Image: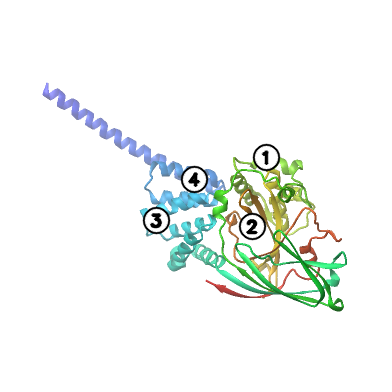
Amino acid sequence: MIKKIFIFSLFCLILIFWSSIHFVQASQQTETELYNTALKLGEEGDYALASKTMNDLVSISPNNDFYLAYASHYERLAGDFENGLKHALKAIELNNSVPWYYASVAFNAYSNTDIEIAREYCQKVIEFGTDKVGQDNFESAKKIISDLAKRVYKITWTLNPSKGVKKQGMYFIPLPTQNLPYQDTNYEITGCNNKKIVTQTENNVLYFIPTNNKLITLKAEVTINPYSYKKQLTQYEEKTDSSKEIEIYLKPSDRINPNSPVINTLAVSLKKENKIKTIKNILLWMKNNIKYKIEDFQNADDIIKRGYGECGGWSALFTALCRASGIPAREVWGVIEDPTPERKFAPSGHLKGHAWAEFYLYGQGWIPVEPQSPATLGLLPCTYIRLYHYDPYTHISGDENLRPSINMVLMGGDIPEYDINIVH
């Protein structure tokens, strides 16, 4: 009897041992298959599904730092920066000897508007050097450090009023915006006999008559601080602001018709359960489907149909899709440091005119974003200087309802000279 029990027990142990080996082999095979699937999806550009597949791997092996880091990598590419940051930090907690994990923390933190974490880990990436983190990661970390550095600009516009348009007998141009969380300005204007400044919401517009019809000079000192709207993005209420000042930014305006079938159909397909998720989805769709190319357009519909546009096309399309989704939005014009010097958008020592956007959240106000980059949601680089937001009553044609920003461009104000002091 004892012998039979022993033989049976031995048989059970062998069966359990064989089963465990088979399970481990099957599990390893499943992990390999999942990893290879994720890589293939990543190569195909399906980053959302690639990140989901890597998360399946993390569920199987939650303490595998490599899986966590790769999940973080694909989450960043898919626009899921919050989870990307969480997984990259966990990967470092498990294994702090892999340099590119630090890059994943840095880039997800920046895109998640976590300024201090982004700075800290970008500095670590730079300290590792190019041999350990790679040239691309090294340069990207340097750029983020630069984009997050406080700047004091001294800008000079020399303008020719005779090339512009008058409104009620006076020329008009925008002035750099004051009293924003990220920007403040002092300015001096010379060459005018008569001038007045009209302030409406965040816009300051100078009306003037030049002295003897000669040039005027606008000198501005603009301070830009890194500022994250993360608090506003998390604390807003899913309500609609019924005030006329906000409702106008849901309606059609020059080159934007949120009620057009082309815009409306796309907006419906991109709409999510709340405003922030909808905005993120719009930005991600634009990143994956719209290319940058300089060419005139008639309206935002054109950008969808042809799949490309310059900065004005990107800002118009983003604004149109937000409005069609019930989110007040508006285009913004200002000047920036040339983001691609090799294209020579502006001569050395000059800024360049540029368009981006803002959207409105109930109880929190207007939030800036660069439609060409999902990573800027609520955190613009410190190289952006705001002058004017478009309202539905102004347009790009040449009469007295002309946008002040267009008037400034007509007068030669698209590429002002500048000096800069960067405070790290």
Going from the N terminus, do you reach mark 2 or mark 1 first?
A: 1
Q: Nearer the viewer, mark 4 or mark 3?
A: 3
Q: Amino acid at mark 4?
A: Ala
- Residue 185, horizontal then vertical, whole percent: 66, 69
Q: Nearer the viewer, mark 1 or mark 3?
A: 1
Residue placed at 79% from the left, 76% from the top? Answer: 216
Residue placed at 86% from the left, 72% from the top? Answer: 162
User: Please, which residue is most extreme toward the left here?
Assistant: 2
Please name whichever residue, 252 or 15, is drawn nearer the observer in this view of the structure.
Answer: 252
The coloring applied to the image is rainbow
Going from the N terminus, do you reach mark 2 or mark 4 first?
A: 4
- Residue 263, horizontal then vertical, whole percent: 73, 44
Q: Which residue is mark 3?
A: 92
The local secondary structure at tag 2 comes to loop
Q: Amino acid at mark 1?
A: Val
Going from the N terminus, do you reach mark 4 or mark 1 first?
A: 4
Q: Which residue is mark 2?
A: 370
- Check residue 38 in the rendering and tell me which mark sits there, or answer none: 4
